[in-house]
Structures are given as structure tokens and as C-alpha cells.
Image (tube, rainbow, N blue to C red):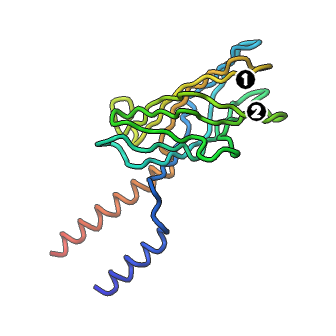
Amino acid sequence: MLRRLLLISVLVGLAGPASAGTLLWLDVDSGVSSVAFSGPPPDSRTLSGSLAVELGALPPLAATTTFDLRVLTLLAAGPGGFSIGLDPGVASPGAGVLNVAGQFLIPTLFLQLDDGLVLTDLALSNVTGTFEANGPGCVYTYCLQTSFEIDGGVPYGLISVSLTAIPEPSTAALVAIGVAGLALHVRRREGSR
């Protein structure tokens, strides 16, 4: 019993202090995510990257909760590629809310576009999307989907971003290992009785 208490206290100490919400890391699904430019000339490219979302509560929700995009790194492949990230000069650049239906709203999303030569600060109004947990449109533990448009000026024109993010493969693997270990522990415990 003493060993068990000691092990629990060590594990709690390694976990660190509790945060206000749950932080989930997601990878951009480059198979379905894209960025398109109105031109000139018109162009469409694959989008890759990662993001982290902090939620006040995990779905399924009983009430509206906080939704805060903490990390965002989007990379557009190809010649003249660029990256899009959260504006580091703004406190909580991706703060919003998530309702019980799984729809999120970020009233103003503050981004920074980097084309390798110039950093451009952007403020996008009313960015919406969905955040599902194993729902009809999501075969993964969690899925985030959104699309928005950015006025990229010269040389990009209107930039249309379509984004789907799913759990990082490493996160899914760790969860699977944890569940397998728990099942093995239960099986051994039942076998010893």
C-alpha cells in the first residue's frame, strides 16, 4: 500500500501543475487541407502543419466552454511558399468559444503571414468551424475543421484556407499503449484471484 501511494505521488509530481483546461495537439491532415490563391495566376497547394487547442471542457459538452487556439503553424508547399501562424504580439490571438453542438467561434483571429521576405499581421473576423469528438464526420478521437479567407494582397490575392486537423500520430499511439497497458493490468489482476 505504501509503495502504491509513493508511486501515485511521484506520477502526480511528474504531471506538473494542473492547467485551466485541456490542451490537445493536432496535426493538419494534408490529404484534405489546402490553400488556394485567387492569383495572378490562380494556384492551389497542399497545406501542412500543426496546432494546439486548449478547451475548458472536453466534448461531449453540457454547456458552452472556452476554446483557445494556442499554437498554429501552417505551411503552404511549393515555390513561393509561405507560413501562417498566430500573431505573437497579441495576447490570446485565437481565443473563442465552443458550443454543445461542436461549433466554435473565434471573434477575431490574429494571424501573421510570413512569405520569407515580409511579415504581415492579419485580423480575421468571426472565424468559425467544428470541433468533434468521434462524431459522424470524425473517425478520430478529435477533429477540427474550419475554412477562412485572407486578403493576401500582391502577389497572392484572396487566400482561401481549408483546414482539417486530427490527433498527432504519436498522441494516438500513446493513448493506445495506455489503454493496452490498463487492459493487461486488469487481466492480470483478475487472473490472480
Q: Distance between the residues labelled 1 and 2?
A: 9 Å
Above or below, comparing residue 177 to residue 86 in the picture:
below
The percent coordinates of residue 73 (x first, y second) are 64, 41
Task: Name the image quarter holding residue 87.
Answer: top right
Residue 19 relative to residue 108: left or right: left
Residue 91 relative to residue 142: left or right: right
- Graded by Cα atoms within 10 Å as few (under 14), some (14 to 19) or many (20 or more), the crowding at tag 2 reads few
Q: Quadrant of the N terminus?
A: bottom left
The percent coordinates of residue 90 (x first, y second) are 66, 44
Instruction: Determine the residue located farthest toward the right in the rendered image.
Output: 117
The percent coordinates of residue 156 (x first, y second) are 75, 20
Above or below, comparing residue 13 to residue 84 in the picture:
below
Say which of 107 and 181 sits in front: 107
Above or below, comparing residue 17 to residue 75 in the picture:
below
The percent coordinates of residue 44 (x first, y second) are 66, 19
Marker disc for residue 120: 2
What residue is rendered at 38% in x and 29% in y?
137
Q: Mark 1 points at which residue?
A: 152
Q: How many numbered marks, from 0 up?
A: 2
- Graded by Cα atoms within 10 Å as few (under 14), some (14 to 19) or many (20 or more), the crowding at tag 1 reads some
Instruction: Determine the residue located farthest toward the left in the rendered image.
Output: 193
Three-letter code for the amino acid on which mark 2 is drawn = Thr
Could you say whether the residue bearing mark 1 is in a helix, strand or loop?
Answer: loop
Say which of 49 and 185 sits in front: 49
What residue is rendered at 45% in x and 57% in y?
20
What residue is rendered at 49% in x and 48% in y?
54
Discs 1, 2 touching: Cβ within 8 Å: yes
Marker disc for residue 178: none
Task: Name the image quarter holding residue 41.
Answer: top right
Task: Name the image quarter holding residue 158.
Answer: top right
Q: Quadrant of the C terminus?
A: bottom left
